Image (cartoon, rainbow, N blue to C red):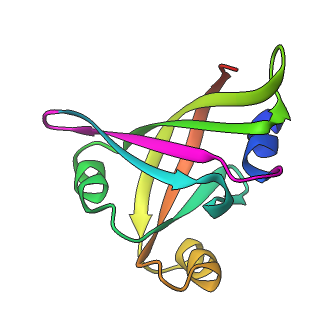
Amino acid sequence: MLDPKLIEILTTGSDGALTIATNAPGGAHLVNSWNSYVIIDGDDLLIPVGGMVHTEENLKRDNRVTLSVSNRDVMGMRYKGAGMNLWGTARIENEGPAFDKIHARFGWARAALVITVERSVQTL
């Protein structure tokens, strides 16, 4: 089950940045997206894939991901502004239900990044 604070961060107010880290041969590889691009699908996060070529290559070797999400409109631990780090596994799908949900909202998407969150920690 996704943390309620994570859902609030992803669905509240103005848009916030989302960073996805995969394990590349030379170290971490980072890509960015937007909170408003995330579709919450049960315990999975669906994110449209436009480019993400290196991310896709990295996931073929190692499907573990780390994400950082934040939102300045959500109450954090001490003051307004909340952030979380997430860990889980991911895959890229270019057909099937996850892709259909992404493509219906983001016609430009060539695939769906499907992230299964295994652990999350609030940092702000």
Magenta residues (range): 12-26
The quarter of the image holding the C terminus is top right
The quarter of the image holding the N terminus is top right
When asked about the image quadrant of residue 30, the answer is top left
Identify the residue at image location x=67%, y=29%: 83
**Is residue 103 covered in magenta?**
no
Identify the residue at image location x=57%, y=71%: 98
Q: In the displayed structure, does residue 116 sit left or right of residue 121?
A: left
Image coords of residue 91 (percent x, y): 41, 57
Image coords of residue 93 (percent x, y): 43, 70
Can the viewer see residue 1 in this picture?
no
Can the viewer see residue 119 in this picture?
yes
Image coords of residue 35 (percent x, y): 65, 53
- Marks counted in the figure total 0
Identify the residue at image location x=83%, y=37%: 4
Q: Nearer the viewer, residue 61 or 15?
A: 15
In this rendering, the answer to whether 109 lies above or below 63 is below
